[in-house]
Image (spheres, helix red, strand yellow):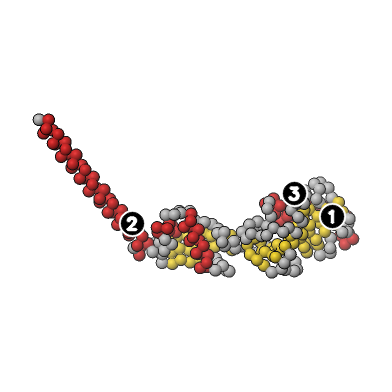
């Protein structure tokens, strides 16, 4: 009797093993088939890859950098490859590329039904030129250095001469401290609002944390990089009424709440 019960349990167990083996075999086959379909079928192949909004970048070079950046960020993308639409659809996508500092924003848009990938880019625009001797670079309104430029003269584009010897790195800020850039730009904006034309800007050695703006008449305004003078617009208006700017050499704002002149 016990032998009969044991045989029944054994046959039942063997049936379960066979059933689960068939299920796993079916699932494995389905998985392999689905993987093959995703990886190799033309249904998932990118039909069109384009870059929009570009004016000056090398599009092929930019796309190559973008693909490499996406591959390095997600190793699973290597299985799909950039010719697969799912490569672009899923996972994190970089909004900027270290190898293309001229691009401030890159947005990847995927149309699955059309198998189309559009990469919209916004290129940086020159807000000024920063020079150390004849070594000059263009920077945008946020102070990011993004391209070499020739040395310039005139008033149409802001030029900043920098006494420091540290080399520029494309894609980095013009100053090691963000507050320095903010203070300088904010001060220059006040000059512009008060119709005071600045002909040149000079940044002293970083250890001094000083800079100066010179007007077309030769009058110099000395400032600290570490702060912006309070109520500068009102002060400039009062100074213009009290002094003949053509007879002065400089105004010194480097000490908080103090103004010196000569």
Report the mark closest to the observer, 3 or 2.
Answer: 2
| Residue at the image point whose x is 49% and y is 60% from the top | 68
Residue 53 percent coordinates (x, y): 55, 66
Asked whether the beta carbons under mark 1 and mark 2 sit within 8 Å of each other, the answer is: no
Left or right for 9, reference 75: left
Query: In the rendered image, is residue 199 in sight?
Result: yes
Asked whether the beta carbons under mark 3 and mark 2 sit within 8 Å of each other, the answer is: no
| Residue at the image point whose x is 25% and y is 51% from the top | 26
The circle drawn on residue 251 is 1
Mark 1 packing: few (<14 Cα in 10 Å), some, or many (20+)?
some
Residue 103 percent coordinates (x, y): 58, 62
Q: Quadrant of the N terminus?
A: top left
Left or right for 234, reference 13: right
Residue 12, above or below 65: above
Mark 3–mark 2 Cα distance, whole angstroms, equals 60 Å
| Residue at the image point whose x is 80% and y is 61% from the top | 214
Q: Nearer the viewer, residue 161 or 118?
A: 161
Q: Which residue is mark 3?
A: 227
Dot 1 or dot 2, earlier in sequence: 2
Mark 2 packing: few (<14 Cα in 10 Å), some, or many (20+)?
few
Q: Which residue is mark 2?
A: 35
């Amino acid at each position: 009797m016990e032998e009969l019960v044991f045989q029944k349990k054994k046959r039942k167990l063997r049936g379960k093993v066979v059933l689960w083996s068939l299920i796993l075999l079916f699932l494995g086959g389905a998985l392999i088939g689905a993987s093959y379909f995703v990886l190799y079928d033309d249904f998932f192949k990118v039909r069109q890859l384009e870059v929009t909004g570009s004016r000056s970048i090398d599009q092929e070079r930019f796309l190559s950098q973008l693909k490499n950046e996406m591959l390095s960020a997600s190793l699973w993308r290597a299985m799909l490859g950039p010719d697969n639409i799912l490569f672009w659809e899923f996972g994190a996508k970089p909004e900027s590329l270290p190898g293309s500092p001229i691009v401030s924003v890159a947005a990847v848009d995927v149309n699955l039904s059309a198998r189309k990938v559009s990469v919209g880019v916004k290129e940086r625009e020159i807000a000024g030129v920063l020079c150390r001797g004849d070594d000059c670079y263009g920077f945008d309104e946020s102070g990011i250095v993004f391209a070499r430029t020739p040395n310039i003269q005139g008033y149409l584009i802001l030029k900043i001469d920098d006494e420091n010897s540290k080399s520029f790195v494309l894609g980095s800020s013009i100053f090691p401290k963000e507050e320095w850039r903010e203070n300088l730009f904010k001060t220059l904006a006040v000059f512009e609002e008060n119709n005071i034309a600045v002909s040149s800007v000079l940044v002293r050695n970083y250890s001094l944390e000083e800079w100066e703006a010179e007007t077309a008449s030769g009058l110099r305004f000395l400032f600290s990089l570490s702060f912006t003078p309070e109520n500068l617009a009102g002060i400039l208006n009062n100074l213009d009424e009290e002094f003949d700017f053509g007879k002065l050499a400089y105004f010194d704002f480097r000490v908080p709440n103090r103004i010196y002149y000569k």
